[in-house]
Amino acid sequence: MICMKYTVLILVCAHLFSCAETVVYNPEMGGMSSNTTPPLDPSWGGSPYGGMPAGGMEVNAGTQATAGTQNLGGMMINAGMQAGEPIQTMPNCNTQEICDAIDNDCDQKVDEDLLCACTGDTACYGGLPGTQNIGECRDGVRMCNPSSESWTTCTGWMGPKEELCDDLDNDCDGNSDEGLRNRCGDCAPEVQEICDGEDNDCDGVTDENLLNMCGTCGDTPMEVCDLLDNDCDGETDEDACSILDLDLDGDCLTVTCPAEAPYPISCNIDFQGGDPRGCVAYSPPGSSVYLQEGNRCGSGKVVGTLTCSNQVGSGLNANNCPINKDEVTYPADSSGCAETD
């Protein structure tokens, strides 16, 4: 009975429609029907809804086939199909297999024995080995050309570039900004250390090689004649002072400081005559001091000290240059002292 049914279907297919059409199993209509209108022509010797088809063969619409799926000349018939299900057609199984992801030769394999790019990965990369998908390096895309069974050119990929200081791994070596940041971590040249109490160059040391002997910024202070260790070398007033011991005859005298300490900064004068007046004349930055007792330049005597410095002082006065007289003056030059006889 199953073989008879298949024969009827083949005859109907040959007369009514091409094998590309779909034939539907419909038990309510007595068996097979096509998607054409009308389904069958009674003048061909058969009934459009079963009964006696061409050749007087009886088709039993209620018969269940158990033979599974049959391939009849390119048309698939499922003997166990349900009502309303289409009978699927198959491709021409005599064609050669091509690269199109379809089983062209009906051997249950797709694109077999072909060097077919269609079944490969569309991701591609044209950069150096070991850099793919590292840092800023990215895959591109290639497309398959089924007719030539080959990939198109890989486009859109990004390979290694020169490293920039931008927090990115431009050269795709797994590191960012290598060799481009300074010790402080900035995208800039190394910072020069300045003497400001800060670690400007980020080396862990503050003001290195910039502090003077006194531990302060700037040049080492010059030693001056002030009884202090100005240059922080452990010595006081070295090479800064020259103290002249005075023991001079006369009462109108000029005393000059030496070249290594040319500036008078203090004195202690004792006039030995009997006149109550004493005068010390000096004007910075001169090197000489004029000493006069009274108004006579006779046979008096002057004793005491004169301190000279390598730094210019503010001048001589009663505070830094006391005189043993009741009437004392400190003019800028000798003309300010009493007029002499």
Image (tube, rainbow, N blue to C red):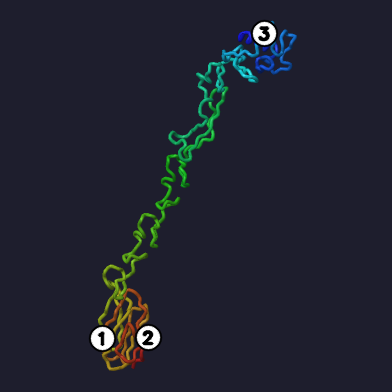
- Quadrant of the frame with the C terminus: bottom left
Which residue sits furthest top? 55
Please name the residue shown 36% across and 91% down the image: 338
Badge 3 element: loop
Res 100 → quadrant: top right
Query: Which residue is under mark 1?
Result: 303
Residue located beneath label 3 in the image: 58
Q: Quadrant of residue 87?
A: top right
Which residue is more in the foreground, 233 or 243? 233
Circle number at residue 331: 2
Q: Is residue 94 visible?
A: no
How far across and down, in percent of the image, does residue 26 sit? Answer: 66, 17
Q: CA distance from mark 2 to mark 1?
A: 20 Å
Q: Earlier in the sequence, mark 3 or mark 2?
A: 3
Q: Name the foreground residue: 54 vs 243.
A: 54
Between discs 1 and 3, the one toward the N terminus = 3
- Which image quarter holds the N terminus? top right
Q: Which residue in the rendered view is the most extreme toward the right?
A: 43
| Amino acid type of the residue tagged 3 in the rendering | Glu
Residue 268, given in percent of the width and then of the height, sits at 29, 84
Q: CA distance from mark 3 to mark 2?
A: 157 Å
For disc 2, the neighbor class at 10 Å (few under 14, some 14 to 19, many from 20) is some
**Callout 3–callout 2 Cβ contact below 8 Å:** no
| Amino acid type at image mark 2 | Pro
Neighbour tally class for label 1: few under 14, some 14-19, many 20 plus, Cα within 10 Å: some
Q: Secondary structure at mark 1?
A: strand
Q: Amino acid at mark 1?
A: Val
At x 74%, y 16%, the residue is 38
Residue 148: percent from left, percent from top: 56, 22
